[in-house]
Image (spheres, helix red, strand yellow):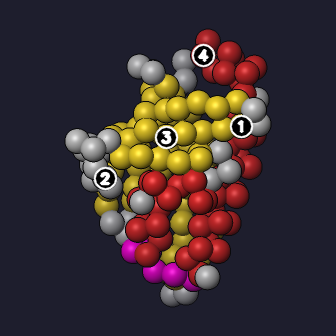
Amino acid sequence: MPDLTETITVAAPADALYTLVSDLPRMGEWSPECTGVAWNSSTPGPAVGARFVGRNRVGAARWMTQGKVIEADPGRRFTFKIFFGPLQVALWSYEFTPTAEGCVVAESWTDRRPAALRSAMNAIFGDRLKLNQRGIRITLDRLKAAAEG
């Protein structure tokens, strides 16, 4: 079960939203925390198995993560794992449900950090649950604006 899931209705087709979300190098346009993503040249995405590096920031803190796409079903679902070094720390998923007016986009986050790391990281970066709740809302709002604009 995800720790957080937020939805938004967008007046655009599911395929168009999927294309925006799965173009991970553009994630910095939507996310308030992710400043950029680069696909690994030997496994470019957005296909299952594709790997990438993400650059992130919260306040003065900056860090990099590694990711791997585990689900890439155009117009339906896009899911990836995030690693901090050797540890999987998160699972992110986007679901696209067509509606008569466009689609509903659901963004979900599952915390996969070990308990000890969770406490240490929350002390350094802030409460991840609260940060991601705010971040998901901003991401979805920006995605909607881009898709409808």
Q: Callout 3: helix, strand or loop?
A: strand
Type of amino acid under label 1? Val
Nearest to N terminus: mark 4 or mark 2? 2
For disc 2, the marked residue is: 45
For disc 3, the marked residue is: 54
Query: What x and y, as percent, mark residue 58?
Result: 71, 37
Front position in the image: 126 or 43: 43
Type of amino acid under label 4? Leu
Q: Main secondary structure of the magenta part?
A: loop
Task: Classify 10 Å Cα crowding around label 2: few (below 14), some (14-19), many (20 and above).
Answer: many
Q: Callout 4: helix, strand or loop?
A: helix
- Mark in front: 4 vs 1: 1
Q: Residue at 59% of width from left, 60% of height from top?
A: 29
Q: How far apart, in angstroms, are the residues tagged by discs 4 and 3?
A: 19 Å
- Which mark, by number, is residue 27? none
Q: Residue at 75% of width from left, 32% of height from top?
A: 60
**Callout 4–callout 3 Cβ contact below 8 Å:** no
**Callout 3–callout 1 Cβ contact below 8 Å:** no
Front position in the image: 139 or 112: 139
Nearest to N terminus: mark 1 or mark 2? 2
Residue 126: image quadrant is top right
Q: How far apart, in angstroms, are the residues tagged by discs 1 and 2?
A: 26 Å
For disc 4, the marked residue is: 117
Task: Classify 143 as above or below 68.
Answer: below
Query: What x and y, as percent, mark residue 149?
Result: 61, 82
Query: What x and y, as percent, mark residue 69?
Result: 35, 45
